[in-house]
Amino acid sequence: MGFFNENAKLVKEDFQETDYLDCSEDLRIQKNNFGSKIWLKKGKLHDDFREETEIKMNKEDFDRAREIFNSLGLCTKIKWLRDRKQFNWDEIKVCLDYTKGYGYIIELEKISSEEEKEKILEELKQKLEELKIPLTPKEDFENKFSYYKENWRNLIEDDNSI
């Protein structure tokens, strides 16, 4: 955090409540300090590259969107409660997250074209090396996410740090 406070621009601080919906796609609804949204992420969870489609809404629309999805049988299968600090660092979006019951995550993101994606991935890996942060193996993320998926209700109740 200290590094980014000194070397990057704080863009925003946010609290996010995200529901992953129980369906075959990665469909989510989220309410945060600034509004709410419905979004679909294509590809597999934890892929290096994912196409996203978003519909932004007013913050007040979150509960109505959840109600509509629930009435269609798309109920919440996982809930994230996340504190996020977003920075702009060398034209890279950096998110420092604390997710209740899950822990801390750093995410580096840069929007790219299909042709540039491998080059951008290498740039982001280089930035992690500069920070002396090893890239977490996908298997570790999968294991942690699977555990969270099975236990999130108890984990968000037991963790009083937010």
Image (cartoon, rainbow, N blue to C red):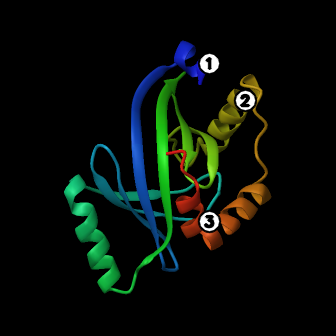
Q: Residue at x 52, y 79 (%)?
A: 24
Question: Do the numbered discs 1 and 2 sit on residues whose CB atoms are within 8 Å?
Answer: no
Nearest-to-viewer mark from 1 and 3: 1
Which one is nearer the viewer's eye here, 97 or 132? 97
What is the C-alpha distance between the residues marked 1 and 3?
31 Å
Mark 1: which secondary structure?
A: helix
Query: Which kind of residue does numbered mark 1 sit on?
Result: Phe
Q: Is residue 159 above or below residue 116?
A: below
Mark 3: which secondary structure?
A: loop
Q: Is residue 3 above or below residue 84?
A: above
- Does residue 116 appear left or right of residue 32 in this picture? right
Closer to the N terminus: mark 1 or mark 2? 1
Question: Do the numbered discs 2 and 3 sit on residues whose CB atoms are within 8 Å?
Answer: no
Query: Which kind of residue does numbered mark 3 sit on?
Result: Lys
* Few, some or many residues within 10 Å of mark 3 (<14, 14–19, 20+): few
Q: Position of residue 70 (x, y in %)?
A: 34, 81
Q: Residue at x 76, y 41 (%)?
A: 135
Q: Position of residue 104 (x, y in %)?
A: 63, 43
Which one is nearer the viewer's eye here, 29 or 45? 29
Mark 2: which secondary structure?
A: helix
Closer to the N terminus: mark 1 or mark 3? 1
Pointer 3 residue = 44
Residue 162 makes an appearance in the image: yes
Which one is nearer the viewer's eye here, 115 or 11? 11
- Does residue 119 appear left or right of residue 153 in this picture? right
Pointer 2 residue = 126
What is the C-alpha distance between the residues marked 1 and 2?
16 Å
Query: Which kind of residue does numbered mark 2 sit on?
Result: Gln
* Few, some or many residues within 10 Å of mark 2 (<14, 14–19, 20+): few
Closer to the N terminus: mark 2 or mark 3? 3
Q: Residue at x 60, y 19 (%)?
A: 2
